[in-house]
Amino acid sequence: MKMTPFLAATALGATLAGSVAAEGELNLYSSRHYDTDEKLYSEFTDATGISINRIEGKGDELAARMKAEGANSPADVLIVVDTSRLKRAKDAGLLQSVDSEILEQRIPANLQDADNQWFGFSQRSRIIFYDKDQITDPPQTYLDLADSKYKGEVCIRSSTNPYNQTLLAAIITHDGEEAAKEWAEGVVANMARPPQGGDTDQLRGLVSGECGIAVSNTYYFARAMRTNVDGVSDSIDQIGWVFPDQDGNGAHMNLSGAGVAANAPNRDNAVKFLEYLASDQAQVYFSAGNDEYPAVRGVEIADSVEKLGKFKADEVNLSDVAQNIPAAQRIFDQVGWK
């Protein structure tokens, strides 16, 4: 029997409350590098009695470690940022399917792996920022970034960046490989400089005048509004933003997601942890603590995120998008996107 969202939430509370007696431990491999996540972990331990042993590192490095450890890996849960890394972990046989009514009901279907090997727990939108003084007619769609009138204006990260890989894979999913290649060629022709740095560096490029348009995830900008980010916050009023494709597919969303490790020694605790990440309590904290959008619909978002305004999100199935990531990397290589 399928549970209603209300029953799913009630069951989630019962799961967490009832698991105190179980206690034990959880071995977490995480590529999330945010100090604010400490509260997420401590509150899970307080609610369940399950202690968390955490190993942090870059997503692909953690996956390589799990692969080298093989059947003896102590990992119970792998958390990584972006759909591309979740796909690589799945393809490497590092994750296992999870049968959880709570996750099925709480996490939207388009943010789940088709085989339930990974689930998205927080979202970021990859949008267009621009220098208000320099650009009076900013791009309104992703495809507009390839318009020749923006030649020499665009700052964007490298083709090895997972956020860009997933964005191009989404364009392939919607429009096909030929259109995606044409777009990538146009963006390369419009670059203000060779790809360099992280998302915050693209925003700094606007402030310095090196570029008029930048592509970045929303939470980097929201953080600069909320806290002092060097090279961005002092000039925040100079920067405008556009949620692309509002008359079409909607703004692209990428994920922070997790799955249960294939050889998890504490599998039951691992499933409890994923279910906890889907709770209202944890979902609110993803937004309040790190300026992200919750994966669960209807959950309150942080003031810093709310200031960006309402928008239409692309609800394409990210499991389908994941299948096009290899094609995206091939196109990047073909068009010379460094």
Image (spheres, rainbow, N blue to C red):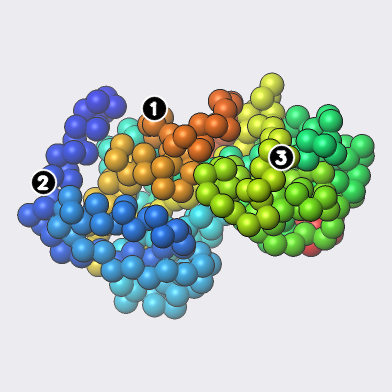
Instruction: Indicate which disc residue 239 carries.
Output: 3
Q: Position of residue 51 (x, y in %)?
A: 21, 63
Q: Residues within 10 Å of mark 1 (few under 14, many from 20)?
A: few
Q: Position of residue 196 (x, y in %)?
A: 74, 62
- Position of 88 with respect to 212 (left or right) is left
In whole angstroms, how far apart are the C-alphas of marks 2 and 1?
26 Å
Q: Position of residue 267 (x, y in %)?
A: 25, 59
Q: Amino acid at mark 1?
A: Gly
- Asked if 117 appears above or below 124 in the picture, the reply is below
3 vs 1, front mark? 3
- Position of 255 with respect to 299 (left or right) is right
Q: Secondary structure at mark 3?
A: strand
Q: Are marks 2 and 1 in contact (CB under 8 Å)?
A: no
The residue carrying mark 2 is 18
Q: Position of residue 24 (x, y in %)?
A: 15, 64
The residue carrying mark 1 is 298
